[in-house]
Amino acid sequence: MALRTGIIGMGTMGRVRKREIDRHPGFQLVAISDINEQVADEFPGIFFSTNWEDVLKQKLDVVFVCTYNKVIPRIVITALNKGIHVFAEKPPGRTVSDVLEMKKIKDKHPDLILKFGFNHRFHSSILEAKAIVDSKIYGDIVCARGVYGKAGGLSFAECWRSDKEIAGGGILLDQGIHMLDLLRFFMGEFTQVKSFVENLVWDEIDLEDNAFAIMKTAENKVAMMQSSATQWKHKFLLELIFEKGYIVVDGLLTGSRSYGEERIVFAKRQFEDEGILGKPKEEEIHFDEDHSWEYELKEFYEAVTGKNTRINGDIDDALATMKLVYTIYENALNK
């Protein structure tokens, strides 16, 4: 029997989740909430309310929370207390305290699944990179560099993502959190952080338009990261340097295709042979389709139905990544 499903928030992400829910035979969408009452006209035959609490009063197995950062924790906590499995978008609220409140309730309901939408882990290039990392063919990672940037746009200063009360943080919390999650995914936890958090263009907003960080693990692995709303050309770049080789993930397939073609380049170091120093033979794979939303939903379904026990983006992942975000904020040298 299909899982009775609700969606709270029918903006861009709510519609992405609905598209994948409709494609998956294990879900049956029965209830929707959005603050725009006209959304109801688009989905006849499905229960609709402008009040998210009404959705949680329906008979649900799972709910997808696709709302502003400010209200995510309250909805998640309410759903868990009603015995409903939850898939919530990132970031997991506005602060570390938000995540701790959700974790406290989740710990009281160990049989329920709580997953957050860190879909970048499910991109084909990242899955391929993780397989190479785990194979140890190049040895251990020694350092990494990540850049995730976009053009803030004409309405950047006025949009909800630039409202501290609603969003909590700026470009680092909104987009850079994905890169931090990936760096943790590949390298483990960081114990030392040095950072700058800046308003380089939009001085009129309370939230950063750029963040720069250098981070080190207890095993002496070092990562550098920039999260930027002033890149002007959308960019995703992740470089992993190993003892005996390297991986470059360049580009990211998205709905807008504005981050370019998604590809992974990898090579083994080749300075042992004369004449090859600095120009190793590279292998390259290009990806034409984005299956990350599909794979992420599949993992959630299998967790809810008991087919797997470990999920990406669980409450512990969310807490560790959120702590790293706020360590970057708190350790900023320009404070």
Image (spheres, helix red, strand yellow):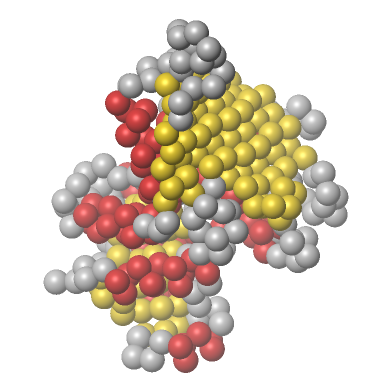
Q: Is 2 situated left or right of 190 in this image?
A: left
Location of residue 21 (image quadrant): bottom left
Where residue 169 appears, as percent x and y from the top left, is 66, 49
**Left or right of residue 128: residue 36:** right
Residue occupying the point 85% across, 54% down: 204
Residue at 71% x, 55% y: name it: 151
Q: Could you tell me which quadrant the C terminus lies in?
A: top right
Q: Percent x, y for residue 39? A: 50, 85
In the rendered image, the residue lying farthest to the front is 275
Q: Which one is in front, 113 or 303?
A: 303
Is residue 256 positioned above or below 209 on the image? Answer: below
> Is 239 placed left or right of 31 in the picture?
right
Question: In this view of the protein, can residue 320 be seen by the observer?
Answer: no
Horizontal and vertical percent position of residue 106: 34, 48
Q: Nearer the viewer, residue 240 or 300?
A: 240
Q: How many marks?
A: 0
Image position, residue 224 (x, y; %): 61, 28
Please say if 154 is above or below 287: below
Q: Quadrant of the N terminus?
A: bottom left
- Residue 31 lies left or right of residue 229; in this view the side is left
What residue sits 53% from the left and 72% below the top?
Answer: 11
Name the residue at 58% across, 30% down. 145
Viewer-nearest residue: 226 or 189: 226
The answer, for residue 248, to whether it is visible in the render is yes
